[in-house]
Amino acid sequence: MPDECIFCKIAKGDIPAEKVLENEDVLVFKDIHPAAPTHLIVIPKKHYATLNDIPQGELAVLAKVFGAVQEITKKLGIAESGYRTLVNTNRYAGQIVFHLHFHILGGRPLGTMG
């Protein structure tokens, strides 16, 4: 599946994206259909289809993802005003691209989620 995965292709540089942060393990790029003034996608470069698919021995990748979230939200100036971090897991939750990814939404009040 990684050969056909659009996010794997973005991570490899085969498909262009507006990258805002990249390191050895994580890539952050702008969403092409933003739902907020700041709407970023954060992916581990290694392919995991969903949050459920990370082996127990590889859960440290989540610390790297959230380290990137902290870094980029501070850099973009939304860390203090607030932002939402969202992950959809499987179809019923709305996951469309089956490469684990997190959305960062900010830049305006987002309201409560009850």
Image (cartoon, grey):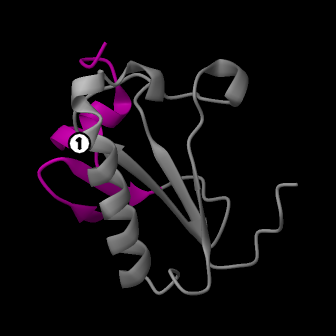
Taking the magenta stretch, the answer to whether it contains residue 63 is no
Q: Is residue 79 above or below residue 104?
A: below
Q: Residue at x 38, y 70 (%)?
A: 70
Counting labels gives 1
Residue 67: image location, x then y, percent? 31, 62
Q: Residue furthest front?
A: 56
Task: Judge from the rendering whether residue 110 lies leftward or rightward of residue 94; answer left or right.
Answer: right
Image quadrant where residue 50 sits: top left
Q: For the point 72% across and 21% down, which residue is it?
A: 92
Q: What crowding class fits label 1: few (fewer than 14 Cα within 10 Å), some (14-19), or many (20 or more)?
A: many
Label 1 residue SS: helix
- Image x and y of residue 5, in percent: 34, 24
**Residue 113 visible in the picture:** yes
Residue furthest to the top: 1
Q: Is residue 9 magenta?
A: yes
Q: Is residue 2 left or right of residue 42?
A: left
> What residue span does the magenta drawing correspond to?
1-30
In this rendering, the answer to whether 67 lies above or below 42 is: below
Location of the C terminus (image quadrant): bottom right
Question: In the image shown, does 9 or 90 lie closer to the viewer?
Answer: 90
In this rendering, position of residue 87 left or right of residue 75? right
From what the image shows, is residue 52 above or below residue 102? above
Residue 44 visible in the displayed image? no
Q: Viewer-proximal residue, 107 or 113? A: 113
Give me the residue at 18% from left, 44% from top: 13
Please name whichever residue, 37 or 65, is drawn nearer the observer in this view of the structure. 65
Residue reaching furthest to the left: 24
Q: Split into 4 quadrants, where in the image is the N terminus?
A: top left
Q: Quadrant of residue 34?
A: bottom right
Is 55 situated above or below 14?
above
Label 1 is placed on what type of residue?
Ala
Q: Which residue is mark 1?
A: 11
